[in-house]
Each structure stands twice: as C-alpha cells, then as structure tokens.
Image (tube, rainbow, N blue to C red):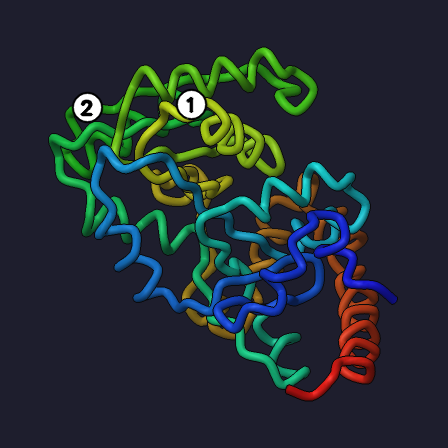
Amino acid sequence: MTDTYSARTGLPERRKNRRHLWFLNATFDRINFDQTVARIAERSADAPFRYIVTPNVDHLVRLRAEPGWVHLLYAQAWLTVCDSRVLELLASFSGEQIDVTPGSDLTAYVFAHIIAPDDPITIIGADEGIVEKLKNRFSLRDVRVHQPPMGLRHKPDAIEACAHFIAKNPSRFVFLCVGSPQQEMIAKACLDRGDCTGVGLCVGASLDFLAGKTRRAPVWMQKWRLEWLHRLATEPKRMWRRYLVDGPKVLLLWWQWRAARAKLHSIEKPE
C-alpha cells in the first residue's frame, strides 16, 4: 500500500520531516496547544496570509474519497493541528503522539486573550446573530463579515469573492466558518491572490459554540472523548450519519494506515 497522502500531494518530504507526523489521511504538525497559540500571537497583522486547518475524524474519513486537489488544500496549510481526541487515542494505540488542539478551544483562546477590542477581524460565514453576540461579549468594535451563498464548493466565483473580501478588509485574524472543504478552498484562494494578510483559521462551527448558538459538551465528556456523543444527542437529525455511519469508518482507515506504515518501515533503509 502506498503513502496515499504524499502520492496525491507530491509532498513526500513533509511526511518524512520530523516536525510532522503522517497519520491516516493527513500530516499533522508536532505542536501542542500552547505552542500553537504562541505561533499565532507572534504573527503581525500585516504578515502575508497563512492558514491553519484543524482536521478531525469527519475530515479524514471524507478525505479518503476526495480528489487530489482537496488534499492539496490541507498540504498547503501553515499549521495542521488535530481537532479530535479520538484521533489522539488511535495514534497512542500505535505508539504515536498527537497533541490535541480543538478548533473551538483555539478560537475561544484567540478571542479571549489575543484579539484586542479595536483589532479588525474578518469573518466568513457566520450569521448576524452570532456576530452581534461576539461583538457584545468581547467588546469588538471592528468586525467585517461576508456571508457567501450556499453550495460554495461548486461556485468558484463565490470562492473568489470571499478571497477578494478578505484582501480588501485586511485583518490580523480571519475566521473561516463555512465547513470543510469550502473554508480551506477560500484559504487557498487567499494564498493564490498573494495580497491577503493575517492568519486564517478554518474552524467550522467554532463561532457557533463561542456565541452560545450551539452548546458544547461538558468538560468531563470532552476529557473522556465523548464530545461526539453529546453532539449526536443534542442534534440527532443532523449528526446521526456523521457519527453512526461515517465516523466508524475511521477504524478501517486506521488499520490501512498501520499496514502502510509497516510496509514502509520494512523497505526503508536504515540511516
């Protein structure tokens, strides 16, 4: 079995780099939560645009069936951090360590400890109610919002419009909240333009949690890796397929990854 991720992206060296861990369908940075927020905080507002992706079980299962260009969206991220404690557990069963940096926790920290009230921020995808709650909670005075149309993945002009809005509204932080892979498509479009600045965070529903629109699992459920069960119980009609049908496919993905790793180790020449 080949290294599918590297073969599709043409970036085998990243898998071999000790700064990264090749795991399932993604290559994660070996970086913990504190290091991630430190890296974010030290970037200036006028620095060239870079983006962060936060793959979880759902992302990696879907990536297995996605074309190569979707894999490239993740490969070109500035940082790839793990959003799933289930993935953390599977990695530990294989003798690997993945530090978890949930996108929701990352977003909450950035708003609470890094963004100042006068800092301009750009949001792609959140509705007006969420934006107003965030402005009130964190005393934000300069929030620029763009609401793209539905079906964004199949509307290249709308993707470009998002990137154009980001370029014309320079902010230290850009929150991309339109789901995967749409948010990563927008981030890549920003890179391609070359005139965008700031840090883009591909964080899905994180603003929903932060604004209180959607309730997160209690801390004890998060620690016991049961956040998925809480979301299933609170949103069964929307989440049943993700967690009961698609999610368990990660076990097959994990078995295939272990087989691929064993084969690679058997043919690698010792240094």
- Amino acid tagged 2: Asp
The residue located at (41%, 44%) in the rendering is 209
Percent coordinates x, y for residue 131 in the rendering: 32, 27
Q: Write the residue at 52% across / 61% down.
A: 82
In front of the other: 97 or 50: 50
Within 10 Å of the Cα at label 2, are there few (<14), some (14-19), or many (20+) other Cα atoms? some
Q: Where is residue 99 shown, x and y percent of the image?
A: 47, 71
Which residue corresponds to mark 1? 127
- Please state the horizontal and vertical placement of residue 200, each as a whole percent of the image: 40, 38
- The answer to which image quadrant residue 117 occupies is top left
The amino acid type, in three-letter code, at marker 1 is Asp
Q: Is residue 121 above or below residue 14?
A: above
| Above or below for 122 versus 61 | above
Q: Badge 1: few (under 14), some or many (20 or more) residues near its Cα, within 10 Å?
A: some
Residue shown at 65% from the left, 54% from the top: 11
Q: Is residue 70 left or right of residue 116?
A: right
Tell which of 89 and 15 is nearer to you: 15
Rendered-image quadrant of the C terminus: bottom right
Distance Cα–Cα, label 1 vs label 2: 16 Å
Task: Give the residue at x 35% y 47%.
Answer: 107
Which image quarter: residue 265?
bottom right
Q: Which numbered disc flags the more N-terminal residue, 1 or 2?
A: 1
| Image mark for residue 142 | 2
Q: Give the total number of marks visible in the rendering.
A: 2
Classify mark 2: helix, strand or loop: loop
- Residue 214, relative to residue 217: is it above or below? above
Q: Nearer the viewer, residue 158 or 6?
A: 6
**Circles 1, 2 touching at the beta carbon (< 8 Å):** no
Which mark is drawn over residue 234?
none
Q: Secondary structure at mark 1?
A: loop
Quarter occupied by residue 254 = bottom right
Screen quadrant of the N terminus: bottom right
